[in-house]
Structure formats: C-alpha cells, structure tokens
Amino acid sequence: MLAEFAPALPGILLPHEQFYPYPKVSDRAAWQALPLRLREEAITSGEAYLDYRWPSLPATLFMDFRRTGNRTRFEEKHFARRKALGRLVMAECVEGKGRFLDDIADGIWHLCEESFWGIPAHNYIEPSLPDVQAPSIDLFAGETAGLLAWTYYLLGPVLEEYESMLCRRIEYEVDRRILTPFLSNTYYRWQGLDHQDPVNNWNPWCNYNCLVAFLLVEKEQKRRIEAVGKILRSLDRFLDFYGEDGGCDEGPGYWSKAAGSLFDCLEILTAATAGKINVFNHRLIKEMGQYLVRVHIAGKYYINFADAKPELSIDSALVWAYGERTGDADLKALAASSRRADLDNGSQAVHSYPLRYLRYLFTFTQFDLELETPYLGDVWLADLQVMAAREQPGSSKGLYLAAKGGHNDESHNHNDVGQFLVYIDGKPVLIDPGVEDYTAKTFSSRRYEIWTMQSAYHNLPIINGCMQEAGRGYRATAADYNAQAEQAELSLNLEAAYPKAAGVGRYQRYFRLKRTAPPFVEITDDLKLQKEQNTLVFNYLTPLVPKKEADGSVTLSGAAGPVARLVFSGMDFALTTQEIWLEDKSLKEAWGEKLYRLQLGAVVQKAARLELKIYRYQEREKC
C-alpha cells in the first residue's frame, strides 16, 4: 500500500526548508489566535516546571530492573523528564517571551547527557547497563528523538539566538542515536523487514518518531528520501498483519499506539509530500479507525481483552482527526463525546507528545460537541472473532455482551479463548480483570505465572485440573455469528483451547443476548469429555458483591444495591465464592480493593451442560 509511493519520493518529498507542519514559535499570530483557555492551560502547565529539579537517573537505578524486575522506579523519573520538557516547550510556544528557555535548556541538556534514551526493560544486551557505542532504537529512544526533533523545529530560531550549541547538540545526538543507526541497520525486529513474524504497535510507534526525526532534523535530502522509503516499507509490514476487520488484537488500550501511531505517520507523510501520499480512503485504514467505536461500551469503558484496562481515556483530538480524514462520522462522534466529558469534568488535555498536543491545540475549535455518542447495536470482528451486542442500540442503557474466540498467541496475549463480558447500563457485571503494572515477568517466559493472564481468572472453566495454555494452536474453531433484531449469537468450538490432558472431546460455547421481555444474556456450555469421571470448575469474575439466594440464583450488588441476577441450570454443582484482594496499583485503580470469583464445581461423567442467564435485578419477578 505505502511502499508503492517510494519510487516517487525524490519528486514529492518536500525538502527540509519547505516542510512546515505546524506554526513555529516565531509565528506569533498563529499562537496568539488560539482560544484563551488553551493558552492559559499550556502556560500554567509549563509554569509548574519553572526552576524544575530534574530527576536523577543513576546507573544503579537503571540496574534496578535486572536486579528486582521492577520497571516503575526508573520509568517514573525517565518519563517525568520528558513530560517536563514537552510542557515547557509548548508553554514557550504559546507565551513567546523567553521565560521558559532556561528550563528548556536544562531539559535538552539532561536528555542529551543520558547514556540511553530507552528504558531498562528494552535494553536486551548483557550486562544490565547499555552500550553507548551501540545505540538501539526502542519505543522510548524513538520518543525522545521525536520530542527533541519537535523542540528543534518549534524553537529552532529562538534557541539559535539563546544558545546555538543546544541546536548543534540535538542534531548530533539525534543523528548518532537514531538517524544513522536507522539507515545502517535493517535488523530492528519492530521494522519487520528481515522476518515474516507479526509486528505490533512497536512498528508504527517507532517509525513515527524516526520519521519526524528525519523530517525535522535531517537536512540532507538524499538521506531523508532513503529513510522515508524504508519507513513506508516497514509500515506495510505492520498493515500486512491486520485482518480486513481492522481489529487490534492488542486491545483498545493499545489502539492509540497501533492504529493511532500509524495515523500519526500518515498525517505527517501527507504533509511532507503536499498531499501526494494520501491513503485515508483505503478500506483497511478506515476499518482500523472504526475498531475503536466497535469496542466502546459506555463512557470510558471499552472491551478490555488482552493487555488493556477496563477504562480508557482516549485522545479526542487524535480520534477526531482520524474520523475527519477517513470520513467516519461515528469516530468523530466518539471523539466529541469524550471531549464533552472532559470539558464537563474540567479535565485538561495537555499532552507530553508534541504532535498530539499540537493537533489538540490547532483543531480544538473544529469539534462539533453536539454529536451524540455512537452506541452500536451489534458488532462482529470476523478476523479477531470478537462480538458485541447491546440490548438497546443507540443507548448505553440495558444489557451489553462482548465475547471472543481467537487464539492464545495474540500480541499482549492472555489465555482467554471463549472469554466474555457483561455490562448493565454501562457498568461492569462480569469482567475481564485486565492487566497489572508491567514488570520483568510480564514479557518473559514466566508471563503465564501472572494470575491475570490465566484462563482460570477469566470467565472460563478449569477442566480436569487444566487451564488453557499459550500458543497459536490453542484456539477457537468454527466461529458462527448471527445477529437479528431479537437476538445476537456467537457459537465457538473451544476444545482446541485446552491441552490434551483436559480430556475434552467436544466443547461448544454459545453466547446470546436476547432482546426479549425481559431481556437477558445467556451463556451455554456443552461439553463431551473423554474420561469416565471429570471435574469441572466454572469461573466467573465480578467486581460486585455476590449473594447466593434461597432458590440457588446469585445476586450481584454494588454500592447502590442489587444490579444483576445470575441463574444457573443444567447440572448439579457446588457454588463457592473467592475474594481476590488486589495489591497491584493498576488493578486497584480499576476495581477497588478486591474482586470476587464465583466458582461452580461439579463432578460429571462424559457429558455436561451448563446454562447461565444474566438478568437485570429488577426483572427478577418476571424470570
């Protein structure tokens, strides 16, 4: 798709001196024309970093990751430095009086003095300290280059007068750490240029920052053309692994870094070629944007399969621009609803990423805040095997069901084939726990020791003591989806999702949302087993307090009272409830102090059938 533009680059890529994607600090009229609120936000955010004490990043803190597995202690200080510089730069652009330049100079100097622009978790060589003679490009080395490149572009003439050596230092460091390594090395795995394995969000995320480094800092046109051609080929490799449905198997939490970073690349490429590279009407690009609408539940809640938190704060300016470029009214409406909620809550959208902050500032007045939130009634992502259905299309009210098939070798995979979620009135009832803060274990051979990655802590059964296992072979088959006005249904064969030791002959799971009177969600498990006697434990995770009623049903209650009623039938079982106390910061922010796991245990012969129906609590008398 994109590589086809590479031969034309000598004639269409604007030279360095003609590339003007956003107003520079010297264009005072453009900055002073911004709405007063935005200017005040930017200046106030920058003022918080006047006389800033830049965090120290000693060698022992870098070594801490290898010693303890902790990522947070180093990363908090690493990102604090970049946040500070980004906000100082934007404040100076808005105000234009030189008041922030001393702190900006210190920020540039601190970043340029760092031995490695990445983070310890991405330093893959031994020993634990990076080799400064062999710079590598990871996500955050790229981000640092991008930040410095935008600083160089926006403030260049001012910095030349203030202290020209700052510009020379940026040129030198960006070249030796990013530009020259990028051109000389074809073996960064995220590029996808030397292998046929899938690539994930690293590809567009790194490519974007390398792209702006070349476009904003590199002056030699031959090198710029060579780099952009390579980036076009690499981005095609990212697109190669997307299905026609545009679904992100990394989950909506990574959309802004996957499809969103691709969009950043495409927008910059369009600007850098005076519109000659423009693929926003391509069907796949449109589908990748629409994915975010399709997995939206209500408010900040999104379907959180894979490494995703249940609540997501989207970048409304990015989503609006994506919708504007691709002609997607739903995507623009989703952006408008997010922006409206932010304004109602007094939230600021001050970004540390320069491009996204610039986009926010210069598109703020384009938003139509009257657009209504798009609540899709039925969704089917055939390549991901993800379905969603809501009781009342066009509204967040009522029952909502999401379910997935797929396989257990997705990017940021959890062992969760056959997982489902249920929400009522836009609030969680049966859930996916999400992901803990990343540590050394998260992306290691010990990943599935983490409980949130295990199928037993999703809404899935343990069969003869076996959970699902990781690997592409552990998958759903024979996905069959159908949606009508009165019902949406997905059926999956799940026998291949479990190891042979589970003794599964056949396992059919059905997910249905019934738009009847009363409406309900129905999950049916139909198993044929190979052993004479089999143990089954069906697990259901909820943030609500469960209570077993006299008739055997289970009531789930929140702070305001009962929310849902669960009715089980089809087999004899023993019901137990486990409290899962949460220690991880991210999980506690999402769910509070604890979750509950309902476990239905049974001993069966060679066949078993379990039906679960989920009703709104107030429908109990009619069930």
Image (spheres, helix red, strand yellow):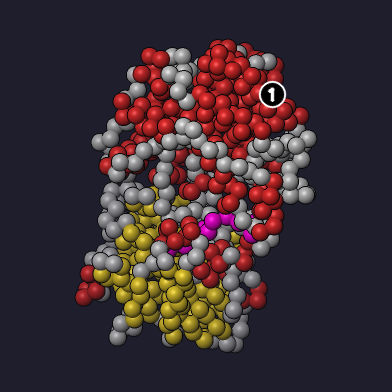
Residue 229, quarter of the rendered image: top right
Query: Which percent across, then down, holds residue 467?
Result: 58, 72
Q: Which residue is drawn at 69% across and 57% down?
A: 67
What is the three-letter code of the residue carrying label 1?
Answer: Tyr
Image spot of residue 131 (x, y percent)? 76, 40
| Residue at screen point 56% across, 77% down | 463
**Neighbour tally class for label 1: few under 14, some 14-19, many 20 plus, Cα within 10 Å:** some
Per the rendered image, the range of residues in magenta is: 431-441
Res 547 visible? yes
| Residue 192 seen in render | no
Q: Which residue is drawn at 58% across and 51% down?
A: 73
* Location of the N terminus (image quadrant): top right
Question: In terms of secondary structure, where does tag 1 sit?
Answer: helix
Q: In this view, does 69 lie above or below 538?
A: above
Q: Nearer the viewer, residue 548 or 21?
A: 21
**x, y percentage for residue 212?**
58, 26
> Number of labelled discs?
1
The C terminus sits in image quarter: bottom left
Indicate whether 468 appears above or below 51: below
Residue 226 painted magenta? no
Q: In which quarter of the image is residue 17?
A: top right
Q: Which of 526 and 445 is in front in this view?
A: 445
Residue 436's spot in the image, x, y percent? 53, 59
| Residue positioned 42% across, 32% down in the render | 47
Residue hosting label 1 = 172
Prevailing secondary structure class for the magenta stretch in the rendered image: loop
Seen from the viewer's position, the closer of residues 88 and 464 is 88
Residue nearer the viewer, 468 or 74: 74
Left or right of 297 on screen, residue 464: right
Membership of 438 in magenta stretch: yes
